[in-house]
Image (spheres, rainbow, N blue to C red):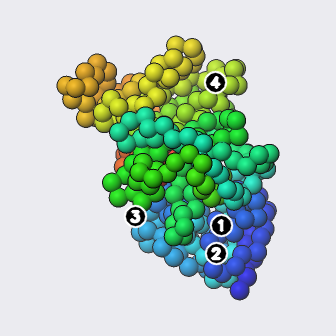
């Protein structure tokens, strides 16, 4: 059965099958609603159902509370229609013209830059029209029906290639495949781009916060600013890892800091030992931000990495450093 969905305040409308989520239906129609993980874990797509009924599906209670449900809130990546709907969901107008598509891609190279991180480059078909905003991600479509999400680490295609940073996870089906079996010329099927993690256009100073391979989309944002050549907004980059080897782009970022007057780079290690001989900052990366910038009211924060890091940063920056909640932009599926 199909239902009609009206989006406020943009006035956009679309028809939606009852077995599809509100978000998937919108994306299929080229309507870029705010979203990130598409799995109900981040809360980015949370919005108000003004009229109509929805099935909340697998919406986690710690992301969408019972009180919020009673008030008409829903996670649009999980909720399915049970009637015609009117929803309040600001459309991301900056992403108009970005189309979600499926495409085959061939492995161009795999560079293992640490014990558990590989930089993978994927070659798209010749003359393929694939565009994305720096900060967005694609999903690898696995043969068993599963999907894995990886952010692009460059601001645009380079030699028709996408670049990912993939960390090997102990129980990671695909990441273990990358380290043990994937090889150049292998084919994968991709879908995207997804996500509303992108630079907002204003004059506010910015904190870029990355943990581990969350550096991939942060690097794309930095490269975007570097290539524009006219950025005047201060950027305070904090990158956290456990050991020195986790900072696999350290030398590149030091070189960019020396080149770019607006960039201040602070690497932070939480588990350095004597073998690392680390002379720099130690501890949790978001606490280093708070030590340096106690008042974030005038700032924007772009964060990507482990959910525990992103969630702690969001909470502490808002509660203790006066960050305006709507100015915390995050991806937390790495």
Expressed as whole percent of the image width and height from the top left, the position of residue 131 reads 73, 45
Badges 1 and 4: C-beta atoms under 8 Å apart? no
> In the image, what residue occupies the spot 28% across and 22% down?
278
Q: Is residue 275 above or below residue 26?
A: above
Secondary structure found at label 1: helix
Distance between the alpha carbons at the discs numbered 2 and 3? 23 Å
Task: Tell me, yes or no, if residue 307 can be seen here.
Answer: no
Q: Which marked residue is nearer to the observer: mark 2 or mark 3?
A: 2
Distance between the alpha carbons at the discs numbered 3 and 4? 38 Å
Secondary structure found at label 4: helix
Residue toward you, 26 or 84: 26
Of marks 2 and 3, which one's residue comes earlier in the chain?
2
> In the image, what residue occupies the spot 51% across and 66% down?
146
Residue 20 is labelled as: 2
- At label 1, counting other C-alpha atoms closer than 10 Å, the crowd grade (few under 14, some 14-19, many 20 or more) is many
Describe residue 205's horizontal placement relative to residue 105 as left or right: left
Q: Is residue 239 above or below residue 34?
A: above
Residue highlighted by disc 1: 24
- At label 2, counting other C-alpha atoms closer than 10 Å, the crowd grade (few under 14, some 14-19, many 20 or more) is some
Residue highlighted by disc 3: 62
Of marks 1 and 3, which one's residue comes earlier in the chain?
1
Q: Which marked residue is nearer to the observer: mark 3 or mark 4?
A: 4
Distance between the alpha carbons at the discs numbered 1 and 2? 6 Å
Of marks 3 and 4, which one's residue comes earlier in the chain?
3
Expressed as whole percent of the image width and height from the top left, the position of residue 17 reads 70, 79
Distance between the alpha carbons at the discs numbered 2 and 4? 40 Å
């Amino acid at each position: 059965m199909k239902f009609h969905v009206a989006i406020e305040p943009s006035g956009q409308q679309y028809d939606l099958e009852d077995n599809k989520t509100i978000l998937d239906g919108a994306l299929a129609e080229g309507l870029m609603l705010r979203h990130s993980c598409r799995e109900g874990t981040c809360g980015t797509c949370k919005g108000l159902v003004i009229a109509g009924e929805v099935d909340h599906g697998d919406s986690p209670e710690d992301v969408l509370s019972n009180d919020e449900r009673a008030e008409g809130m829903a996670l649009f990546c999980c909720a399915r229609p049970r009637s015609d709907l009117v929803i309040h969901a600001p459309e991301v107008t900056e992403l108009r013209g970005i189309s979600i598509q499926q495409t085959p891609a061939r492995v161009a190279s795999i560079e293992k830059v640490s014990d558990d991180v590989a930089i993978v480059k994927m070659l798209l078909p010749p003359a393929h029209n694939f565009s994305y905003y720096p900060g967005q991600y694609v999903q690898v479509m696995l043969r068993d029906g599963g999907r894995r999400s990886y952010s692009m680490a460059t601001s645009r295609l380079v030699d028709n290639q996408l670049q990912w940073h993939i960390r090997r996870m102990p129980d990671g089906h695909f990441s273990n495949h990358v380290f043990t079996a994937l090889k150049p010329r292998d084919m994968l099927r991709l879908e995207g781009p997804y996500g509303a993690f992108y630079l907002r256009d204003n004059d506010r100073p910015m904190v870029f916060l990355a943990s581990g391979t969350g550096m991939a989309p942060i690097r794309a944002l930095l490269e975007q600013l570097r290539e524009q050549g006219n950025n005047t907004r201060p950027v305070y980059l904090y990158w956290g890892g456990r050991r020195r080897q986790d900072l696999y782009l350290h030398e590149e970022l030091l070189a960019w800091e020396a080149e770019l007057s607006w960039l201040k780079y602070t690497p932070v290690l939480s588990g350095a030992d004597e073998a690392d001989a680390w002379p720099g900052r130690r501890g949790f990366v978001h606490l280093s931000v708070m030590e340096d910038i106690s008042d974030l009211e005038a700032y924007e924060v772009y964060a990507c990495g482990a959910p525990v890091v992103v969630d702690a940063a969001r909470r502490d920056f808002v509660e203790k450093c006066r960050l305006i909640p709507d100015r915390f932009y995050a991806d937390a599926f790495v």
